[in-house]
Amino acid sequence: MPMNSVFARRLYLCWLLNNEQKPNVPKLMEITGWPRRTLQDVLKALPGMGVGLEFVQQGVRNNDGYYQLSSWGPLDPQWIARNSEELLAAIEHG
């Protein structure tokens, strides 16, 4: 059974948040090629999955900063890393 592309996108974004230096929406857009709204929707959904997500404010504007995981919640980061190709294939075919 193929992996759900929405779920795969959430898992992959968690992996990126954990492995990229100071990931913000513009940087994530550049890496993934996803639209801004898609990234914002996925970021908004992560806490509903039990993932701890924080925005670290840097600078004076509200959007100056980056995202970081404070907890993987029920997710297994090693599984996500091992299955990154499958996740990307599900996202591409979703």
Image: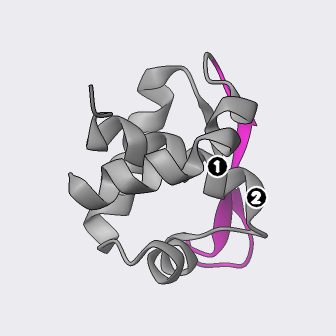
Q: CA distance from mark 1 to mark 2?
A: 6 Å
Percent across and percent down for residue 93 are 23, 56
Seen as rendered, the residue at the extreme front is 1
Q: Which residues are magenta?
A: 56-73
Asked whether disc 1 touches disc 2, contact meaning CB atoms under 8 Å apart, the reply is yes
Compared across the picture, whether 71 is left or right of 26 comes to right
Frontmost residue, 72 versus 84 = 84
**Label annotation for residue 36:** none
Q: Residue 55 in magenta?
A: no
Residue found 46% across the figure and 23% down from its top: 49
Frontmost residue, 77 versus 30 = 77
Kindly identify the amino acid type of the residue bearing the numbered disc 2.
Asn
Question: For the residue carrying disc 2, how many other residues have a C-alpha within 10 Å: few (<14), some (14-19), or many (20+)?
Answer: few
Percent across and percent down for residue 27 are 57, 79
Q: Quadrant of the N terminus?
A: top left
Residue 29 higher or lower than 13, as above or below: below
Residue 55 higher or lower than 21, as above or below: above
**Label annotation for residue 19:** 2
Q: Disc 1 marks which residue? A: 15
Q: Is residue 21 visible?
A: yes
Question: For the residue carrying disc 1, how many other residues have a C-alpha within 10 Å: few (<14), some (14-19), or many (20+)?
Answer: some
